[in-house]
Image (tube, grey):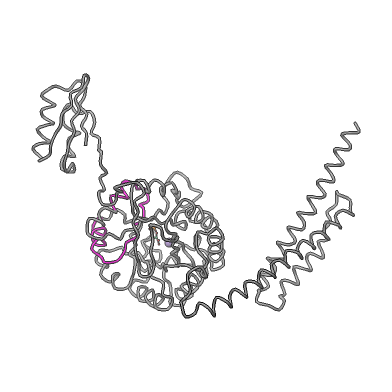
Amino acid sequence: MIVVMRPSATQQEVDGVKRSIEEHGLEAFLSVGEERTVIGVVGDVERISHLGTLPGVDQVIRVSSPYKLASIQEPGERTRVRIGPVEIGLGSELVIMAGPCAVESREQLLETARCVSREGARILRGGAWKPRTSPYSFQGMGVPALKLLAEARGETGLPIISEVVDPADVEVFDDHVDILQVGARNMQNFALLRAVGQSRRAVLLKRGLSATIEEWLLAAEYILAAGNPNVILCERGIRTFETATRNTLDLSAVPVLRQKTHLPIVIDPSHGTGARALVGPMALAGAAVGADGLLIEVHPDPANARSDGDQSLSFDDFGALMDELRRLQFVRAPADSPPLPEERNLAASGIDELRDRIDEADARLADLVQERAALALEVQRRRDPHVHGHDVRRERDLLERAANGTSGPMTPVELTVVFDAVLRASRSVQRRHAQSALNGEDAAAGNGR
Ligand code: PEP
Ligand code: MN
């Protein structure tokens, strides 16, 4: 710590500051400049937080960080937290934590657990106690929900994260849950922080609604100082003047935290945005900015969810997001993990063969789609460029046939989506041709003038 005295400070005032430092068992080093005196302090500066109030003091500058355990000792230092078979942080793969906002029933939870597990999530989330803004909103099922979560873990093998709101519940959470979540509203509930600090489970600490990064790291320090080294930070949006989103998801917190702390960082795009349509893009952005994990709300029937339905992804939405995370290689495809030794030959050769056939089908599909577009283009060429070449009636018939389904594993809806995309691409080819024909016409007219 450095104490900068005012230019007008008297010798008596400088002596007073020096004495106060020494009375608290610390060492003071004076540097007398031409304009002012600066005093360096060595030792536990928490004991002399009053120095700024002494006469003659201009400012007190902290040199070391106030969060000793959470801070990095050297650039790039990272911690990895292990939760059963899952590792998060330092060099491990992006960990997807997904599940309902609140556990509502056995069926709802198990169905969701199976879906998120199948899609590649590594941790199952589910609220048992819900800290709700209104006392009349659904408050969670309590202990029965913890038992259902444990059952879902038994079936899927996914470790579980759930929010603890009362220090007295830490013991029962320890028995049922793998990661204790401290919610945004409890980030500075110091009794709770101390209690989870004594837990043997990992803790995910959400950023408070209006907390600065320093306050957040000091909250993490409470847990670390109480003896629990397995702390994960979670950015879930902060309150700003903006009302278009539920919260403002502070993605810059990730690179900022990387400069300050070694703890793993998770992004929660669900609470961060409050709107289903925004969850996917912000999840991808969180992955791109280097988060170690994502926490995502998924519900079998978002429209009828008992909490946070507006921001919950349907199973289809979640599947599409996982596909995108895999396509961008933030998450590895399941086949990338090494198969069990006994299964390697048989399973690998079978899958390889199937994949070769998929590649062949894709190549044929590409040729067919191009052939279709070439035919559509020919139709457009033979028409007046002011009139579009596609035949709306035949297109409608085609989509109707798709909607009635054909034999195969694709549902009518999926088949309709495919044909819709083919038709849209083919129309765009026709439109491009018509536009260039019209441009040629313009150019010709221009030249003639
Ligand atoms: C939650 O994750 O269910 C939750 C209540 O989040 P937050 O504390 O971020 O509002
Ligand atoms: Mn929620």
Of the 4 image quadrants, the one containing the C terminus is top right
Q: Nearer the viewer, residue 192 or 62?
A: 62
Q: Nearer the viewer, residue 48 or 166?
A: 48
Q: Quadrant of residue 401?
A: bottom right
Q: In the image, residue 358 lies at what x, y percent?
A: 65, 71
Q: Is residue 214 magenta?
A: yes
Determine whether 308 is above or below 22 in the image: below
Q: In the image, residue 27 lies at what x, y percent?
A: 12, 37
Determine whether 384 is above or below 52 in the image: below
Of the 4 image quadrants, the one containing the N terminus is top left
x 69%, y 66%: residue: 418
Q: Quadrant of residue 4?
A: top left
- Magenta span covers which residues? 190-219
Q: Is residue 5 magenta?
A: no
The residue furthest top is 34
Q: In the image, residue 19 lies at what x, y percent?
A: 9, 32
Say whether residue 394 is left or right of residue 204.
right
Q: In the image, residue 438 lies at what x, y percent?
A: 84, 44
Q: Nearer the viewer, residue 449 or 307?
A: 449
Q: Quadrant of ligand 2?
A: bottom left
Q: Nearer the viewer, residue 332 or 305?
A: 332
Say whether residue 182 is left or right of residue 326.
left
Say whether residue 263 is left or right of residue 439.
left
Determine whether 104 is above or below 44 in the image: below
x 16%, y 41%: residue: 43
x 29%, y 66%: residue: 201
x 25%, y 45%: residue: 66
Say whether residue 291 is left or right of residue 303.
left
